[in-house]
Image (tube, grey):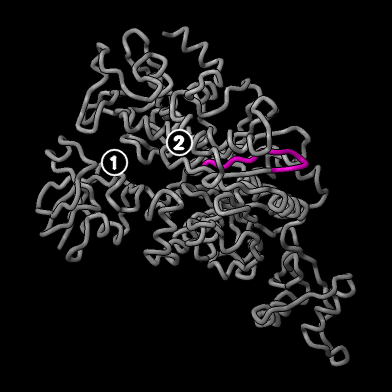
Amino acid sequence: MEIRIADGRTVTADAGESIYAALKKNGIYLVASCGGKGICGKCRVKVIEGRSRIEASARLSKKDREESTVLACQAFPEEDILIEIPEDAKLVIGDKIAVSKAKGLLEFLHSVEQVFTPPVGCTVLDLAPPTIHDNISDLERIKRALDEKGIHGMRFSHDFVLSMSKALRDAAWKVTLAYSDDLEAFALHPSECLNEYGIAVDIGTTTIVLYLVNCYDGSLIDVGMTYNSQMRYGDDVITRIVHATEGGGIAELQQAVVDDVNDMLLPILEKNSISRDAVVAAVLSGNTTMSQLFWGLDPSSIREEPYIPTINIFPVWRAGTAKLRINSQAPVYTLPSVGSYVGGDIVAGVLASKMHRSPEIALFMDIGTNGEIAVGNNEWLITAACSMGPCFEGSGIRHGMRATEGAIESVKIDPLTFEPALGVIGDVKPVGICGSGMIDAISELFFTGLIDQKGKFARDLKTDRIKVEDEGPEFILHRGELRDIVLTEADVENVVRAKAALYAGVSVLLKEVGLSLDIVERIYIAGGFGNYLDIDKAIMIGMLPDLPEEKFSFIGNTSIAGSYLCLLSRKMRQEAAEIAGKMTYMELSVLRGFMDEYMSALFLPHTDMDLFPTVKKAYNKSV
């Protein structure tokens, strides 16, 4: 059977295959937070012609059904059909989106080590050509030159030796030998050491960021960013673990992320006239699941009690093993994980924040699909993770989207007319709402009396901005020609659950070490989402603790920053290992008191308003 798409494309569907599966098989991806299980309600398409068997439509409104809108994962064509895919249902994979470059990292590195020490070293060998009288083998000639330089114990793989003879003669016996930290030779080339490059990679659940770096002077040659194609199989780590284990999809997930890195890197190398063989080192950071999936390791035990990953301290494997399209013998250093849900990205974050070097007690928060938290100083560190869900990335929200052009990023509601004033990324017509916009909107809805402490909409206010549909009440943020953009009561509930998980995690972690919030001297907020966050609004809904604004610092993507530091410094790699070894990992799901804290935080801002004195004061003034 054929599925024709209104934009002119046509794909083939097998008998009994859903629209979603047929499209995905042909490289057309729809937003599907649940991995195509009919739960999230995101993969909506409009069937213009033809019959389909519909298995479920619970996530669709009466109006959707009347307009022949279906969930693609729950619709099975029974004949040739014609469909239309709405813009907000399309999942764009491979788009390059802007990323801010880390600042101050070079200065920090120079304060730690005067000379950069990447995971590879290089030395120039000016070898005497063989003669009838000096007739030792090529390999022995290299070993003799290394001994003269005081470099002993170098190992040589079969792959290295295979190409060695030709490389020496092509370079007229003057070569640069590249070798790994653990003294294994892996490349011979005629250039000087100045032209060796490395990559630092942050493998996020949602996005992947790549830095191409000159390993000699630390300069940032280029930056790339793309969405993690694993989103095809679900938005969060649990959904992907299920796909990996129950769906037999480990190889698919590994291939997706490796392809993302390669597809980003190759155009960057071409643009900068750098050969792939000149990229001789890589450093990766990611949460525990992302790191394991990159290497093709079974993540199933991560989600099963007692929640033990296959590996925390990764060996230094070669790029060829991962099919990274750089020098195949290049060492790949993976930042160590701490536990099942606290990975190398948090180790990188603590490293980049420098909180492990300071005596002041600091709180580190990486806000994303998972909320990871670390508390401590130069003497001790304790860490935990809480599942916030992907709502701040737009998933599970009726008109949610990521912080890209067309997303509502700020909201102000007139307390008398209830008319909203919107800030939209790109100053264009809004097409959805991103995480910062949701926080703004919920804060404004609460302070104008449109929702109560439980996040429920008021029913007695005279405004046409609130309407009641099949799925309950919703607030109209923007009236559009084709559709309204709304925030539903269910959307509010999702955000409240996410913020409650984060706040409860912080509260429980501090109580575990006998500390109160007022003893925390610095709060570091990491993650791309933090760049858009309004501290005041986040405090007003009870997402962040009610502390003076000067205590908060936005430090951006610390996962890529930590990877960059480790790419250029042996000292930083040692500190990363020390951080991971020093961190005490707490599994929140089994901690006594976490559920009580979570339930207490399921209100705006909290059941105990005294924990939020500035919010209490502002709220009492507004009512």
Q: Earlier in the sequence, mark 1 or mark 2?
A: 1
Viewer-proximal residue among 527 and 341? 341
Q: Is residue 217 magenta?
A: no
Residue found farthest to the front:
592
> What secondary structure is marked by label 2?
helix
Q: Quadrant of residue 273?
A: bottom right
In the image, taking residue 101 as reference, residue 401 lies left or right, namely: left
Residue carrying label 1: 87
Q: Which residues are magenta?
A: 371-381
In the rendered picture of this protein, how many numbered marks are placed on residues?
Answer: 2
- Is 196 placed above or below 576 here? below
Q: Position of residue 407 (x, y in %)?
A: 38, 32
Residue at image position (70%, 80%) is 164
The answer to whether residue 568 shows anywhere in this view is no
Residue matched to label 2: 498
What is the x, y in percent for residue 231? 40, 52
Q: Is residue 497 visible?
A: yes
